[in-house]
Amino acid sequence: METQVGILAAACHLPAHRRAVGDLLEEEGAKGGPEVMARLGISSVPACNGEGGSAMALAASQEALRRAGLEAAQLDVIVDYTILPQEFLVPAWNMSNKLQHELGAKKAFTVGFSGGGASNFLVALSSAAALLQANENLKTALLVASDVTIPGSRVLNPADPVSVLGDAASAVILQRGTTRNVVVDTELWSDGANHDVYYIPGGALAHQDEAELYRMELDHSRYDGARKAEGLRRLTSPLLERAGVQFDDVVFFLYPNISSQDQSEFQQAFGATAGQMCLSNRETHGHLQGSDFVLNYLTMLENGSVPEGGYVLAASHGMGFLAGVSLIRC
């Protein structure tokens, strides 16, 4: 029998400071009004006010370890799924290496993923679970991210806003041999033609004096044309078939908090009811990149939304170019 890997504990760390979306729309010269606000479904976001990304990652990791009843010295691997560390220029600098040092995780090694939007979390989840299953010398993994939005880039696509970004750190402890919250399997797919749908045009340091080139950009027409929810349904079928699970056996869906419109499109494609998703965090937190999954996972557990043995599907279209679905058995 294949060794099971499950989620032992999880934690989020959010800045205390908050920004109202109405103010951010005005500051960033974005289109506003009732229709835009309704489509976004976001009223405020947590925003760093002096906090460093690695400091938030450290706090989230320490809390996850505390909840798991583990010491940092027991960690075998640290997997970083951050998109926007915003502390030093990457990839010359590695946040997970700094975190390893500050935690005191002396026997762990670090690896990271970037460029996949919220799907980075699913890539990290799948990769860490596979590592623990394949190597009997590895037992425990820390998945961690800390995203701090580039100044002036909280409103994604100001001319026709798609989402509003908040700041957050999150951490998940995976362990081999667990029987609850088991990571059953993951299916991933990327569309290389859409590699530049979501990007920062600055070109590293080539245009460092031109601030407008360091603003998040989204090709809205290609983003809309990506058939995101349809693609996730296509990935779900082989995933469930391999697991021997019927679609009706899935009782809850973990999905990013991009916008009310995006979540509604997912609900329609998957036939999910409001009670089968965590929708409340979107309004009060906005989009936190991969930390959306951890925040919504914790809310799901707090609300007792899934019975023991129930199946949860975590899904993300990765801003239209890196789609992923993971099956978790609670």
Image (cartoon, rainbow, N blue to C red):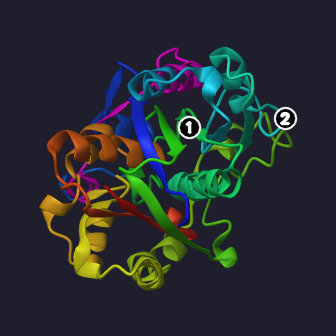
Indicate the position of residue 6 as horizontal and vertical percent values.
45, 50
Magenta stretch: residue 42 in it?
A: yes
Residue 29 in view in this figure: no
What residue would you read off at disc 2? 92
Q: How many marks?
A: 2
Residue 273, how many percent across, how many down?
15, 68
Q: Nearer the viewer, residue 116 or 137?
A: 137
Residue that numbered label 1 is attached to: 145
Relative side of 68 to 52, left or right: left
**In the figure, residue 316 lies in which quadrant?**
bottom left
Dot 1 amino acid type: Ala
Crowding near the residue tagged with mark 2, few <14, some 14–19, many ≥20 C-alpha atoms within 10 Å: few
Q: Residue 263's spot in the image, x, y percent?
A: 29, 63
Task: Give the residue at x 69% y 75%.
Answer: 192
Under tag 1, what secondary structure? strand
Q: Of the two numbered discs 1 and 2 on the same chain, state the one appearing first in sequence.
A: 2
Q: Is residue 123 above or below residue 186?
A: above
Please, is residue 301 above or below residue 240 in the view? above
| Above or below: residue 190 compared with residue 52 | below
- In the image, which disc is placed on residue 7? none
Q: In the image, which residues are magenta?
A: 36-61
Q: CA distance from mark 1 to mark 2?
A: 17 Å
Q: Quadrant of residue 182?
A: bottom left
Q: Which amino acid, mark 2? A: Ala
Residue drawn at point x = 50 percent, y = 24 percent: 70
Q: Secondary structure at mark 2?
A: loop
For the point 14% across and 62% down, the residue is: 274
Position of the C terminus, as image quadrant, is bottom left
| Residue 44 percent coordinates (x, y) | 28, 35
> Residue 234: in sight, yes or no?
yes
Is residue 22 rendered to the left or right of residue 61? Answer: left
